[in-house]
Image (cartoon, rainbow, N blue to C red):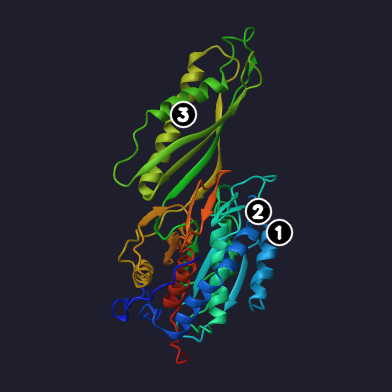
């Protein structure tokens, strides 16, 4: 049973702020006292089981990287069933429903991502145990997709009118291999210039991601002549030995100071047999930082460490026939924010004010999400959690628990959207 949500007094409900960039109109208070918002809050709590059912059934449609089509088609059907007649699927596979505003307010895009990290063939059946759900992708990001559906339903059923247009989205390509291709298509092509502020709903809890952790990921390929481990010994260098030297050099690197900067060799591959001097080897490298300068410096350090290793392996066998060469294949590059957002950034202040009005205080942090792309373009953006609790994201044992107040996630998302888009105040109780 869910506890009854208590509205806090109106005295704590105002959080006036102006948008960071003209010519967008100034936005007003967090409108938790508005009759339409009250109706929506009550409705969301009353049909919370519907939200959970959507979360589960969406999750049981496989959506591996680059194969989100089936889930996207179903998501479109569900948005249309909620009264959105013109729901589009763009060339990338993003699903977009548009809810026009009255005018005079900024346009808001709220999105959950359709893709998962799990490969084709993964068991996506969700197991229910009380309020706990166990299943691949159940929190990241089936929860976000369910929250966006809940916001879409609440806007229509509670007859909420906004000044700005609201775009409700299920996007592709958020996870690693996707390299943010979904939001990149939305913001640089199909909806270029149409989105004033962006909200991603991703994962579980009630916190805010306000800053973008940028990343660079490469598959580094070492290639050499190869040969027999006995017969060719001393006559050819080893691609695996070169890679080993490189890993050792990278492990000794000291990241740039200032904002946290990290690096990691995540996978290694190569070799033909135990008695073959390897002609090939490869390793995947991940670098991350909120600072573009630090990220670039880390990239330079790693390139230098690898070049030094290759030179050392080639020098080890001066009379060899052939040498080791190295190639960098880009896996993904996620941009950092154009500016460092914080608690005083208008869109973040709105998220915090909405949470305060509802009686909780989010943590504000940094991560790598769909919001990286709009942040890098100068579009105000944030990623919010979808409520409830969860764990083991990106693992086979991923779980979500709605608990006693999971409904607060969709309520919070709705209140933020209404606040940012500019609520047309309701006179109907």
Q: Quadrant of the rendered structure where residue 364 is? A: bottom left
Q: Give the left or right position of residue 243, taking residue 366 as reference.
A: right
Q: Of residues 84 and 142, which is closer to you in this image?
A: 142
Q: In this view, does 165 lie above or below 266?
A: below
Q: In this view, does 66 lie above or below 243?
A: below
Q: Of residues 11 and 311, which is closer to you in this image?
A: 11
Picture coordinates of residue 266, whole percent (x, y): 51, 35
Q: Do residues under tags 2 and 1 come within 8 Å of each other at their CB atoms?
A: yes
Residue under label 1, please give it.
70
Q: Of residues 16 and 83, which is closer to you in this image?
A: 83
Residue under label 2, please give it.
63
Residue under label 3, please give it.
307
Residue sitting at 41 percent across and 26 percent down?
249
- In this view, which residue lies farthest toward the bottom? 427
Q: Residue 274 carries which label?
A: none
The crowd level at tag 3 (other Cα within 10 Å; few <14, some 14-19, many 20+) is: some
Disc on the earlier residue, 3 or 2: 2
Q: Measure the C-alpha gap from mark 3 to mark 1.
A: 44 Å
């Amino acid at each position: 049973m869910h506890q009854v949500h208590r509205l806090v007094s109106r005295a704590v409900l105002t959080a006036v702020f102006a948008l960071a960039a003209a010519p967008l109109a100034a936005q007003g208070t967090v409108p938790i006292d508005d009759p339409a918002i009250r109706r929506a809050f009550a409705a969301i709590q009353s049909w919370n089981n519907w939200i959970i059912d959507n979360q589960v059934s969406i999750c049981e449609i496989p959506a591996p990287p680059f194969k989100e089509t089936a889930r996207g088609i179903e998501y479109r059907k569900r948005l249309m069933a909620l009264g959105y007649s013109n729901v589009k699927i763009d060339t990338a596979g993003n699903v977009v429903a548009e809810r026009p505003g009255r005018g005079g307010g900024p346009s808001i895009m709220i999105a959950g991502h359709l893709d998962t990290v799990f490969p084709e063939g993964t068991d996506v059946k969700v197991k229910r145990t009380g309020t706990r759900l166990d299943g691949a992708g159940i929190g990241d990001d089936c929860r976000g997709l369910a929250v966006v559906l809940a916001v879409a339903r609440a806007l229509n059923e509670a007859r909420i009118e906004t000044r700005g247009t609201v775009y409700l989205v299920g996007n592709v390509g958020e996870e690693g291999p996707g390299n943010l291709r979904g939001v990149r298509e939305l913001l640089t092509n199909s909806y270029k210039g149409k989105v004033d502020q962006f909200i991603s709903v991703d994962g579980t809890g009630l916190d805010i991601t306000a800053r973008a952790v940028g990343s660079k990921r490469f598959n580094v390929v070492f290639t050499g002549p190869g040969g027999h481990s006995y017969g060719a010994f001393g006559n050819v260098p080893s691609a695996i030995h070169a890679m080993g030297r490189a890993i050792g050099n990278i492990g000794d690197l000291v990241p740039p100071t200032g904002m946290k900067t990290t690096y990691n060799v995540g996978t290694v591959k190569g070799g033909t047999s135990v008695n073959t001097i390897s002609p090939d080897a490869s390793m995947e490298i991940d670098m991350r930082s909120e600072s573009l300068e630090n990220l670039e410096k880390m990239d330079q350090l790693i390139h230098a460490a690898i070049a030094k290793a290759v030179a050392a392996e080639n020098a080890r066998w001066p009379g060899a026939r052939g040498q080791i060469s190295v190639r960098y294949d880009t896996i993904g590059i996620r941009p950092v924010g154009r500016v460092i957002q914080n608690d005083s950034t208008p869109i973040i202040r709105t998220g915090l004010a909405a949470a305060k009005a509802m009686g909780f205080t989010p943590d504000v942090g940094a991560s790598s999400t769909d919001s990286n792309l709009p942040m890098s373009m100068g579009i105000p953006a944030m990623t919010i959690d979808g409520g409830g609790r969860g764990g083991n994201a990106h693992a086979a044992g991923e779980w979500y628990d709605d608990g006693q107040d999971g409904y607060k996630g969709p309520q919070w998302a709705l209140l933020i959207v209404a606040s940012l888009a500019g609520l047309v105040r309701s006179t109907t109780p």
